[in-house]
Amino acid sequence: MRLVDTSAWIEWLASTPTGERIGLEFPEMAQCIVPTMVQFELTKWLRREVSEEAVHAFLAYSQDCVVTPLSTAIALRAAELSHHYKLASADAIIYASALDQNADLLTCDHHFEGLPDVIYIMKTKV
């Protein structure tokens, strides 16, 4: 199982050079975990940067993945991870969601670099 962070989704959807590398690590839908926090962040970005149609397409796609809501257990674990690793709230929730599902986290967000169970792909400078 693999959770794809919002930063990785954006690079992949934008077909950037980093996104091409992420595509090689992108899980099949049945193995792809999409926390509701990623649905929120990506919907916000797609609405602002792309279109309402892109929002609907992503949400339809994500419904065939493993959608994980923010539970009390994940929130509490996220608080611990935020404190321990100095992560922003959303990043801690996403990381806690991956750990809760015994999944790794695919990201290009440097805040996660070096953390356990993280596949970090550095952004390519254009």
Image: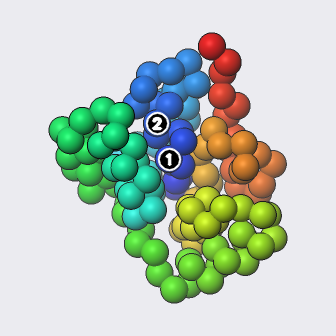
- Please tell me the numbered disc located at residue 54: none
Indicate the amino acid at tag 2: Ile
**Residue 118 pos. (x, y %):** 69, 50
- Asked whether disc 2 touches disc 1, contact meaning CB atoms under 8 Å apart, the reply is yes
Residue in front for this viewpoint, 52 or 67? 52
Q: Which residue is mark 2?
A: 10
Instruction: Please state if 96 lies on the left or on the right of 38 as rendered.
Output: right
Q: Quadrant of residue 76?
A: bottom right
What residue is shown at x 79% (from left), y 64% (from top)? 85
**111 relative to 16, above or below:** below
Q: Which residue is mark 1?
A: 6
**95 relative to 61, above or below:** below
**Residue 26 pos. (x, y %):** 49, 38
Instruction: Please state if 42 lies on the left or on the right of 119 as rendered.
Output: left
Residue in front for this viewpoint, 61 or 108? 108
Instruction: Please state if 13 lies on the left or on the right of 87 as rendered.
Output: left
Considering the numbered disc 2 on the image, is that residue within a helix, a strand or a loop? helix
Report the quarter where the C terminus lies: top right
Q: Is residue 57 visible?
A: no
**Residue 41 pos. (x, y %):** 43, 53
